[in-house]
Amino acid sequence: MDQSGLNQLMWDLHASLKACGIPVSGKIEPQAGVNRRAKRRLGCCFCREGRYSIEVSESILENPELLRVTLVHELLHTCPGCRNHGPRWKAWAQRVQEVLGYRIQRTVPVEGAAEPLRHEEVKYVLECQSCGARIGRMRLSKAVKSPWRYRCPCGGKLKRIR
């Protein structure tokens, strides 16, 4: 998709969200950016000086459905109180699914991307001593350094195995 098509799609989706009663901001830069280096995300919404900029990964430009869902996801971040994936953002995402039929999630499987997002092996692994669940971590976090201080969601004790 070329730049003008991407911009048109973003503003068409913006109008659709507004028509559904979703309070997306009007203070969005007119052009969507294309990030050629993004390896671990499909899109991003930046807020600078009260104006929003939306960009998408180059890897999804040839996948219309994934591109639409990603743009809607980022447009929802322009709603008041929706800079993160908290309850307000989730409520608007649910509304989008009910009215427009787009399933908006915090993360999506990337099989549909033109190029798969970079997958890195985890460096550290914690294991629950009760249920056997394994929890991977990329960084040497507090839980990795002191697993005995933390619990699995099931309540079991954690042990570092790698």
Image (cartoon, rainbow, N blue to C red):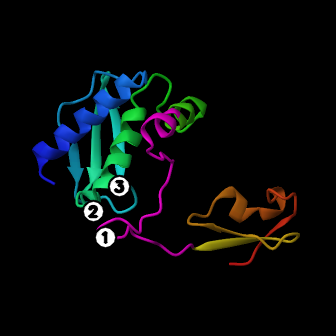
Q: Magenta segment, which residues?
A: 95-122
Q: Which mark is residue 59?
A: 2
- Asked if marks 2 and 1 touch (Cβ < 8 Å), the reply is yes
Q: How far apart are marks 3 and 1 (CA)?
A: 12 Å
Say which element carries label 2.
helix
The image shows residue 79 at horizontal and vertical percentages of 43, 25
The residue that appears at 87% across and 63% down in the rendered structure is 156
Tell me which amino acid carries mark 1: Glu
The answer to whether residue 33 is left or right of residue 113 is: left
Q: In the depicted view, which residue is nearer to us: 3 or 13?
A: 13
Q: How crowded is mark 3: few (under 14 residues within 10 Å), some or many (20 or more)?
A: some
The answer to whether residue 46 is left or right of residue 133 is: left
Q: Distance between the residues labelled 3 and 2?
A: 10 Å
Q: Is residue 13 magenta?
A: no
Q: In this view, does 157 lie above or below 44?
A: below
The residue that appears at 23% across and 57% down in the rendered structure is 61
Residue bearing mark 1: 115
Tell me which amino acid carries mark 2: Ser
- Asked if marks 3 and 2 touch (Cβ < 8 Å), the reply is no
Q: Which of marks 3 and 2 is nearer the N terminus?
A: 2
